[in-house]
Amino acid sequence: MARPILLAVDDDVNVLEAVVQDLRRHYGSTYRIMRAAGGQTALDTLAQVKARDESVALLISDQRMPGMTGVQFLERSRDLYPDARRVLLTAYADTEAAIQAINSARIHYYLNKPWDPPEEKLYPVLSDLLESWKGDYRPRFDGLTVLGHRWSPRDHEVRTFLSCNHVPYRWLDVDGEEGRKLLDDRKMDGEGLPLVLFPDGAVLKNPPPGELAARVGMRVQASEDFYDLIVVGAGPAGLAAAVYGASEGLKTLVIESEAPGGQAGTTSMIKNYLGFPQGITGAEMGRRALLQAKAFEAEFVTQRATGLKIDGQYRFICMADGRQVSSHVLLLAPGVQYRKLHVPGGEQLTGRGIYYGAALVEAPTCKEQDVYLVGGANSAGQAALHFAKYARKVIMLVRGPGLAATMSKYLIDEIGRTSNIVLMPNTQVVEALGDEHLERLRLRGQNGEEEVKAESLFVFIGAAPRTDWLPPSVLRDEKGFILAGPDLRSEGKLPSEWREKRDPFLLETSVPGVFVAGDVRYGSVKRVASAVGEGSIAVQFIHQYLAGF
């Protein structure tokens, strides 16, 4: 298989040679290093490479070139290789143009010349970009295959599980030509869909998450019975707590019933998170945090927490497989899920055209279709921009008069610049119609009711906390959000459940030694950065709690 390509572009022969040598020295064993002496030459090279069906991982171009600037080249290169990482080399005087190009040409980074020493100024940047590119890269396939029906809820669940846990796979429709051929080649009758087929010939039929997780190499059982810290949830708050707890010497177990990154992990692109000027996908953020926590020896198990028991100074988490683990201290960060769309037809068509959250695995199946989204917050805006890359048209259904009150300005501006996104204010879904899958929607808007053809509806309304498995001793508000710290007081008094002589710590719940962080906490700010902050500072209160033993 041909190695992915790194292409360097500069009209200055000496600078181009220096770039190529530095790239070859560090990346030559993994990537094929190519060069071009100008923008048009580089575009011609990319066209030839595209015709050979080869992959391009990174483009690094000088800004000041005759005939075509680096920004112009990188912008035009997106037509040929939209997923390649784009880096602009600039002189200090061109810094402002480089910053503007982050939006106009969607460059991923700019580097000021000179970049000596490359070990400090070049390789860390490029390596980070290449790791990100590899997360999206799908080489010629020789791995896991999922075979199922597009309109099957279980098929959707399996694909989402694999995608969010960064397990490469290809999906084939059992009714398609390639899917039928695979069944014939494997001499299978298609019973037990969805099927998960492995390169060694093994087949799992409609596998539950635990069985699938174990088969693809994920840990499903804890290695110990007792830990210093148990974290329930692997969203931004839980991952931050795992990183800080494990890095500070706490033996840490993270119980993740979903993918790393939680609800944020389904976000197509987060562009207002500090330190990522080109943006970062929720899945990529979760992947990086997972690797970081594991580097500090935090342990992860794919299980579903089903109960919490308190026995003196020990806190026991019961899991879906019947096992339990214990600790002195527990952090609850199970996150939230989108609220259901309670309209006629909504329940029976869930997973058959109606999806909650971004459901990124469905995006490629929406080519040349009209996609409907319900919601007006940031998550809906990010999803709309993502689906706009595939769909013929994305229609945003917003109950209010517009987006200004619920969405960040940068997203509103970008949506306004995207020609195939249409906003329908003061509009709501009143009925979902279809037999085997979603076929039509009945909408109520400013001009009354109308029925529209629709095969895909993605819902982003409200937040329902995942706390129904907790005992009554963990106090919550009427919606299920967990009370902690000062919010435990009512009319100045702590609840009768609190029997300690001290006040609860800031993020401590009504049960001593049980803390909460992230979206599931009452009164939390529903932003990724806020969740990360809460997860990290919770560890400081955990240390204070443990110091009392």
Image (cartoon, grey):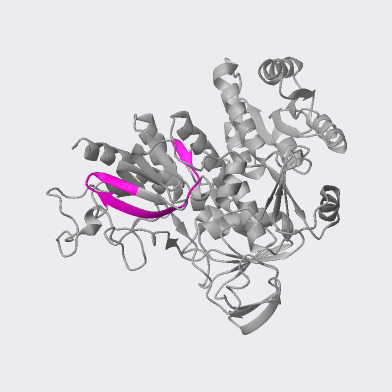
Left or right of 275 in this view: 393? right
Tell me if 315 is positioned left or right of 189 in this view: left
The spot of residue 223 in percent (x, y) is 44, 36
Q: Residue at x 27, y 44 (%)?
A: 314
Magenta span dominant secondary structure: strand
- Residue 164 appears in view: no
In the figure, residue 120 lies in which quadrant?
Answer: top right
Whether the magenta-drawn stretch holds residue 310 is answered as yes
Give percent across and percent down for residue 4. 75, 30
- The answer to which of 462 and 109 lies nearer the viewer is 462
Depicted 395 relative to depicted 299: above or below: below
Residue farthest to the left, as pictured:
501
314, 377: nearer the viewer: 314
- The residue positioned 54% from the left and 75% from the top of the image is 426
- State the count of labels: 0
**Between 160 and 359, which is closer to the camera in this rendering?**
160
Q: Quadrant of the C terminus?
A: top left
Which contiguous range is marked in magenta? 299-316
Q: Is residue 390 magenta?
A: no
Q: Quadrant of the N terminus?
A: top right
* Up/down of 364 relative to 94, above or below: below
**Do we see residue 504 in this rendering?**
yes
Residue found 71% across the figure and 31% down from its top: 59
- Quarter of the rendering containing residue 396: bottom right
x and y, in percent, of residue 207 in the image? 63, 53
Measured as percent of width and height from the top left, residue 164 is found at 58, 47
